[in-house]
């Protein structure tokens, strides 16, 4: 029962934020996303990406299967695509790690500067 109330409150919160964004005319700016609680935003992102994946799986798989069905070396093609994906994923992960480290270093510098400013 509590789970249903939780889902209902999430849906009502999302609907309220979206309705307010429509009234203000800022729906196309995506600034309304910042008004969503993190739980609702996470559920929304999961639903969008999983829905996009399912739509691609359902609609594109039969079309792509016809192209690959009689192709020799189809496994090689899959290997190349997978290796390209892994390279891009590795680059993205590395850039995210560098950005996180820079943010931590900057926060540490800000704390040090603030502490020295309040000490003197």
Image (cartoon, grey):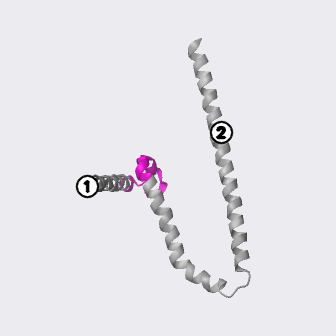
Question: Looking at this view, is 118 or 86 the one in front?
Answer: 86
Label 2 sits on residue: 101
Which quarter of the rendered picture does the C terminus lie within?
top right
Question: Looking at this view, is 29 or 116 the one in front?
Answer: 116
Answer with the quarter of the image where residue 85 lies: bottom right
Q: Measured from the top left, where is residue 46 in percent x and y? A: 47, 59
Labels 1 and 2: the sequence-earlier one: 1
Answer with the quarter of the image where residue 43 lies: bottom left
Q: Measured from the top left, where is residue 110 in percent x and y? A: 61, 27
Would residue 52 appear left or right of 100 to someone viewing this image?
A: left
* As drawn, 67 above or below 83: below
Q: Measured from the top left, where is residue 106 in percent x and y? A: 64, 32
Label 1 sits on residue: 1
Is residue 62 highlighted in magenta?
no
Residue at far left of view: 1
Which of the two marks, 1 or 2, is nearer to us in this view? 1
Magenta stretch, main secondary structure class: helix
Question: Looking at this view, is 55 or 35 the one in front?
Answer: 55
Question: Looking at this view, is 50 or 26 the one in front?
Answer: 50
Read off the magenta span. Answer: 21-41
Q: Measured from the top left, where is residue 6 in percent x and y? A: 31, 52
Count how many numbered circles sit on residues in the image: 2
Q: Residue at x 43, y 47 (%)?
A: 38
Residue at far top of view: 120
Within 10 angstroms of label 2, few (less than 14), some, or many (20 or more) residues?
A: few
Which quarter of the rendered picture does the N terminus lie within?
bottom left
Q: Residue at x 58, y 13 (%)?
A: 119
* As drawn, 51 above or below 67: above
Q: Residue at x 62, y 41 (%)?
A: 100
């Amino acid at each position: 029962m509590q789970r249903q109330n939780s889902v209902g409150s999430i849906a009502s919160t999302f609907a309220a934020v979206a309705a307010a964004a429509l009234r203000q005319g800022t729906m196309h700016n995506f600034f309304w996303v910042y008004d969503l609680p993190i739980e609702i935003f996470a559920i929304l992102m999961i639903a969008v990406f999983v829905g996009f994946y399912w739509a691609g799986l359902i609609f594109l798989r039969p079309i792509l299967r016809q192209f690959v069905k009689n192709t020799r070396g189809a496994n090689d093609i899959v290997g190349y695509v997978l290796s390209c994906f892994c390279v891009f994923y590795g680059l993205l992960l590395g850039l995210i790690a560098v950005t996180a480290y820079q943010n931590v270093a900057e926060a540490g510098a800000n704390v040090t500067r603030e502490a020295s400013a309040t000490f003197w």
